[in-house]
Amino acid sequence: MSTPAAPAVVPDSALADTVLGRLTEVYPAAGDPFRAQEMIAYMKGVAPFLGVRTPERRALSRTVLAGLPAPDETDCTAVALRCFALPEREYHYFAVDYLRRHVKRCSSAFLPVARTLVTTVSWWDTVDHLAAHVVGGLVAADPALGARMDEWIADDDLWVVRTALLHQLRFKADTDADRLFSSCLLRSGHPDFFIRKAIGWSLREYARTAPSEVRAFVAQNSSRLSPLSVREALKNLPPV
């Protein structure tokens, strides 16, 4: 079942006022309507686009942030929620990049905000970065949040589930293997491509650190895992 989440409240933030003022001035000016249509088609119409390519967008972002102080958690919350409230996808990308850069300034209390972002205009292009770099960063800083991931893995929202599966992607030797394996088994029967792919991806990434453990897990549970999950999990392992 879905875990209830209180509506996210956008806090006051003078820094966010400045960031959003600059952002909404420079991003649209750099947009390309023809390119925007290409981007909309590539992303299956999940959101409108301004038509700013990634290298140019990141250069513009540096201009937006030039001379500004580092944010605190309130600023991060305000910037992210206000960006995700705007329709065009480039603003969402800005928010994700901003949080990736400053996640260490956020406490465990930021997790509900991260969940709001995961469930807002959800698609892999934002969710996967939020999972690995933002939610993962929060859990790495406070392992007690792993219990929340145990709740998220049982959620009805497939993007919350995908986040729970992918949050340890960058943990390497610090991966909680028991949590990873149990999460994969719990959702192994999920019919959605994005969950089956995430199961395989999370196992494949852990296989870089513990190849024998992943191989043994897949062999023991091959009848429960989807062919896609098995194929992805073993993708980079040499044949036996």
Image (tube, rainbow, N blue to C red):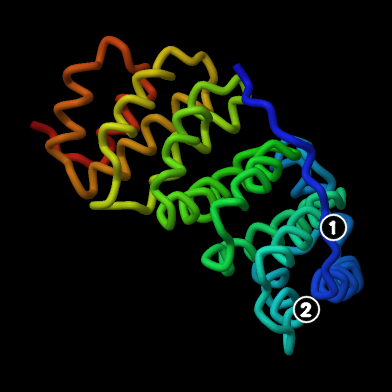
Residue 197 location, quadrant? top left
Question: Which residue is painted at 65% across and 57% down in the image?
Answer: 96
Residue at mark 1 to residue at mark 2: CA–CA distance: 17 Å
Mark 1 touches mark 2? (CB < 8 Å): no
What amino acid is at disc 1? Answer: Leu
- Kindly report which numbered mark, 1 or 2, lies closer to the viewer in this rendering: 2
Percent x, y for residue 22?
Answer: 86, 75
Q: Secondary structure at mark 1?
A: loop
Residue 25 vertical placement versus 150 (above, below) = below
Q: Residues within 10 Å of mark 1 (few under 14, many from 20)?
A: many
Name the spot of residue 86 as percent of width and height, x first.
86, 52
* x, y percent for residue 78: 78, 60
Residue drawn at 52 percent across, 38 percent down: 163
Residue that appears at 71% across and 72% down: 56
Q: Is residue 42 left or right of residue 182?
A: right
In terms of secondary structure, where does tag 2 sit?
helix
Q: Please tell me how crowded label 2 is: few (under 14), some (14-19), or many (20+) other residues with Cα within 10 Å.
A: many
Residue 77, numbered circle? none
Residue 237 is drawn in which quadrant? top left
Residue at (62% x, 25% y) in the render: 3
Q: Which residue is under mark 1?
A: 50
In this rendering, position of residue 186 left or right of residue 203: right
* Percent coordinates x, y for residue 233 in the rendering: 30, 33
**Which residue matches tag 2?**
64
Counting residues from the start of the chain, the first of labels 1 and 2 encountered is: 1
Which amino acid type corresponds to the residue marked 2 in the rendered image?
A: Val
Quadrant of the image for the N terminus? top right
Q: Quadrant of the C terminus?
A: top left
